[in-house]
Amino acid sequence: MIALEKRPQPSQFWTFAAPIVAVILTIIFGAALFGLLGKPPIEALGKIFWEPLFGEFNFFYLPQLLIKGAPLVAIALGLSLGFKAGIWNIGAEGQYIIGALCGAGVALALYPMEARWLIFPAMLIAGAFGGFAWAMIPGVLRVKFGTNEILVSLMLVYVAEQLLASMALGLMKNPEGFGFPGSRNLSQYSSASSWIDQSNGMHWGVVIALIGVIFAYILFAKHILGFQIKLAGQAPRAAAFSGVSPARLILFCLGTSGALAGLAGLTEVAGPAGLVSIDFNVGYGFTAIIVAFLGRLHPVGILFAGALMALTYIGGDVAQSSLGLPKAAIQVFQGMLLFFLLGVDVLTNYRVRIKQGVVA
C-alpha cells in the first residue's frame, strides 16, 4: 500500500525541485495532448518555447515578453503577499479591470488636455486606488463579518466584467468612433518619458513590476512586516500570541494586491492595449495565480515564472497561427503547470512510503 508520511520539516530539495519537475511534466503531457489533437508534438513545443526566442521573427516576439510578462509579475507579487499569510485573493482579474477603468476615466475626463506629465501620474494614482478599493470589499467583509474572501473576490470579477462592458458601450465610448465599442486611444499618455518605448517592449508596466520585485524582496528579507506575513501563514496561533493583528494583515495584503493589480490594469490600458474595450481583460488575474505558485511565492522566482508564462502566451499564439492549435489547448497547457505544481508540491511536506500488509 502506498501512503503519505508527514515530514518533520519541509523538504528543501522539493521546495526548489517541484517547479522544475512540474514544468517537465507539463511539457511531457502537453506534447501528448498536442499529439491527440493531431498536431506534431515536438514541432508544437518548438513553436511555443523556441520560436519566440530564437526563431526568424524573434525581433518581433522578444519585446512581447516584457509586454505580456509585466502585468503577470505585478499581479503575482501582490497575490503572493496574501498567499503567504493564508489570505486568498482570487479576484485580481476584477481589480485589474477596475484599475484600468479608473485610470482611463481620469484620462478621458481631462481629454484633450496635453499635459502628459500631469495626466499620467494622476492615472497611476487612480488605477492603484481603483484596484485597492475593489480589493477592500472582500477585505472589509472578511474582517467585519467573517465572509470568505475567496468567494467574494471571485464573484466580484464578474461584476467588474459587466462594468467593463457597460463602460465600453456607454460612458467611455469614443464619440468619434463611428459607433464602434471602445474608448479613445490612451496610449499617448504612457509615453510621458522619452525612454519608455513600446517598440522594444519597455513601458511603465515593466518599470512598476521591477520596482515591485525589489520592494517585495526587501519586505520579506528585511522588514518585520514580511516576517509577520510569513508567520501568519505558517503558524497563525503563534502570530496571534506575538501581537500580529489579523484584521490589519488581511486589509494590508488584500489592499496591496488590489493596488498592484489595478496598476497592472492601468499600464495595460494606457500602453499595450491602448483603450478600454469589451474584451480588454485576457485573464492575467487568473494566470498570475499560476505565476505566484510557480515562483514559490518568492519575488525573484515570480519574475522568472512570469517570463515563462509570458513565453507560453506568445508561443501559444505562434502555435495557433502556424499549426492551427485551438486556443483552448494552449489554456489547458498553461493550466497543467498549476495542476502538476500542486501535485508535486505534496512531496515538500510529505514523503511517499510503501507499506506491506492487507488493508481491512
Image (tube, rainbow, N blue to C red):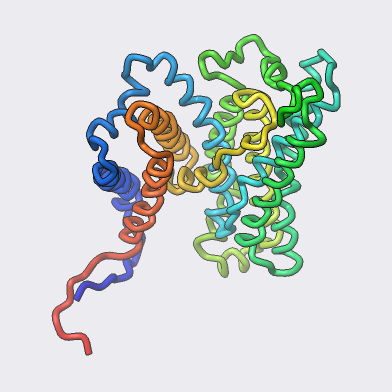
Furthest residue to the top? Answer: 194
The residue at 54%/13% (across/down) is 199
Q: Relative to 85, is 303 above or below?
A: above
The residue at 26%/37% (across/down) is 39
Q: Position of residue 68 (x, y in %)?
A: 51, 30
Q: Relative to 342, is 301 above or below?
A: above
Left or right of 50? Residue 335 is right
Res. 120 in view: no
Which of the pair 8/106 is nearer the observer? 106
The residue at 59%/25% (across/down) is 207
Quarter the C terminus occupies:
bottom left
Which of the pair 289/173 is nearer the observer? 173
Furthest residue to the bottom? Answer: 360
Q: Position of residue 100 (x, y in %)?
A: 70, 35
Which of the pair 203/77 is nearer the observer? 203
Left or right of 120? Residue 26 is left
Q: Quadrant location of residue 264?
A: top right
Q: Position of residue 288 (x, y in %)?
A: 51, 43
Q: Position of residue 339 (x, y in %)?
A: 38, 54
Quarter the N terminus occupies:
bottom left
User: For the image shown, how many numbered marks are present on the structure?
Assistant: 0
Res. 90 in view: yes
Furthest residue to the left? Answer: 356
The residue at 50%/61% (across/down) is 234
Furthest residue to the front? Answer: 179
